[in-house]
Image: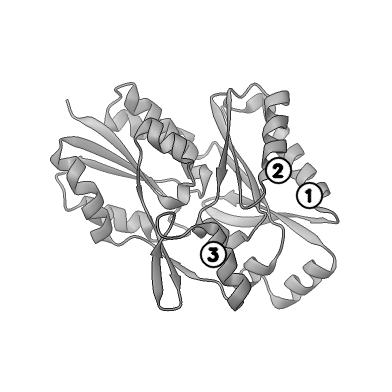
């Protein structure tokens, strides 16, 4: 019986430790600075993106892998008689899923299953790790697909954003909103709802207040959390991420609280000092 290889894209923001542990393959998105194109998490990382924005005042563009990129990534594993389950960035946000499906049509029916995560960052990562655990248990592609699909609507993703600058540059809030947000020190909380990013809270005042609100919002689900693992995902917020990790270890029964850093795609939308709490509900 063929083995099952789990694939994802670079927006899943999974730490290298987990990619290696579960032998997960990653297809990178593109980050485009003016006339230069880079592979996310391969040629460029979030810190370099933030430097570019600081120096130019412009956001880079991002682009999905092409169908050809996916074909080249998938082919060696199909030739090695491994089936593939790919879990990627929400189709509400990118053509990544569409291009993976086009590529899958180039291979024999049933060998590649493409799953729309309806999520981003480690919201995808939770599904990918669930799939990888099932693959290690010897589950079939159809069983893995069913497990992943059953969790899609149970993923909770919320981020605190330190500045409205990146949302403004990306066209997600107006100049007036950005100006008054800066003036009033408004710190947005963003959630993933129905596959898209939505502003759900606007906390006025010190960052500690917004961070505490984010933490309390998540801890309200503590009795309903899947206790296998969760993620604290951040962009240049190491100390706060360590603090939030400690709080979940103290106040919940989650066995593994993993820290991860955002790649360029999430970073280009949210900016530096973003911090997210990501978990699955039972």
- Mark 2 crowdedness (10 Å alpha carbons): few <14, some 14-19, many ≥20: few
x and y, in percent, of residue 135 in the image: 33, 28
Q: Is residue 4 above or below residue 172?
A: above
Q: Earlier in the sequence, mark 3 or mark 1?
A: 3
- Left or right of 169 on screen, residue 8: left
Q: Which numbered circle lies on residue 50?
A: none
Residue ID at (52%, 43%): 123
Marks 2 & 3, CB-CB < 8 Å contact: no
Q: Residue at x 55, y 72 (%)?
A: 59
The residue that label 1 is drawn on is: 210
- Left or right of 82 on screen, residue 37: right
Q: Earlier in the sequence, mark 2 or mark 3?
A: 3
Q: Residue at x 25, y 57 (%)?
A: 102
Which residue is at a point 22% across and 36% down the rendered structure image?
Answer: 83
x and y, in percent, of residue 100 in the image: 30, 53
Q: Position of residue 52 (x, y in %)?
A: 56, 70
Quarter that holds the C terminus:
top right
How far is disc 3 from disc 1 in space, using C-alphas?
25 Å
Q: Which residue is mark 2?
A: 239
Residue corresponding to mark 3: 49
Q: Disc 2 to disc 3, how far (Cα)?
A: 21 Å
Disc on the earlier residue, 2 or 1: 1
Quarter of the N terminus within the rendering: top left
Identify the element where label 3 is drawn: helix
* Label 1 secondary element: helix
């Amino acid at each position: 019986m063929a083995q099952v290889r789990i694939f994802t894209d670079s927006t899943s923001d999974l730490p290298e430790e987990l990619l290696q542990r579960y032998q997960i393959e990653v297809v990178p998105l593109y980050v485009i600075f003016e006339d230069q194109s880079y592979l996310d998490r391969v040629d460029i990382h979030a810190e370099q993106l933030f430097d570019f924005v600081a120096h130019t005042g412009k956001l880079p563009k991002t682009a999905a892998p092409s169908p050809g990129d996916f074909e080249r990534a998938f082919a060696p594993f199909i030739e090695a008689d491994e089936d593939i389950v790919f879990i990627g960035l929400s189709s509400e946000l990118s053509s990544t899923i569409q291009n993976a499906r086009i590529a899958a049509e180039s291979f024999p029916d049933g060998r590649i299953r493409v799953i729309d995560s309806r999520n981003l960052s480690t919201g995808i990562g939770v599904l990918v790790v669930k799939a990888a655990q099932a693959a290690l248990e010897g589950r079939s592609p159809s069983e893995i697909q069913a497990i992943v699909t059953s969790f899609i609507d149970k993923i909770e993703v919320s981020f605190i954003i330190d500045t409205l600058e990146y949302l403004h540059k990306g066209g997600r809030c107006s100049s007036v909103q950005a100006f008054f947000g800066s003036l009033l020190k408004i710190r947005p909380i963003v959630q993933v709802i129905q596959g898209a990013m939505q502003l759900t809270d606007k906390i006025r005042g010190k960052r500690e207040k917004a961070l505490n609100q984010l933490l309390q919002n998540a801890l309200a689900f503590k009795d309903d959390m899947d206790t296998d693992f969760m993620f604290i995902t951040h962009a240049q917020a190491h100390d706060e991420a360590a603090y939030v990790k400690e709080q979940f270890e103290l106040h919940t029964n989650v066995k593994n609280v993993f820290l991860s850093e955002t790649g360029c795609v999430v970073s280009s939308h949210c900016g530096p000092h973003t911090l997210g709490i990501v978990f699955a509900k039972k």
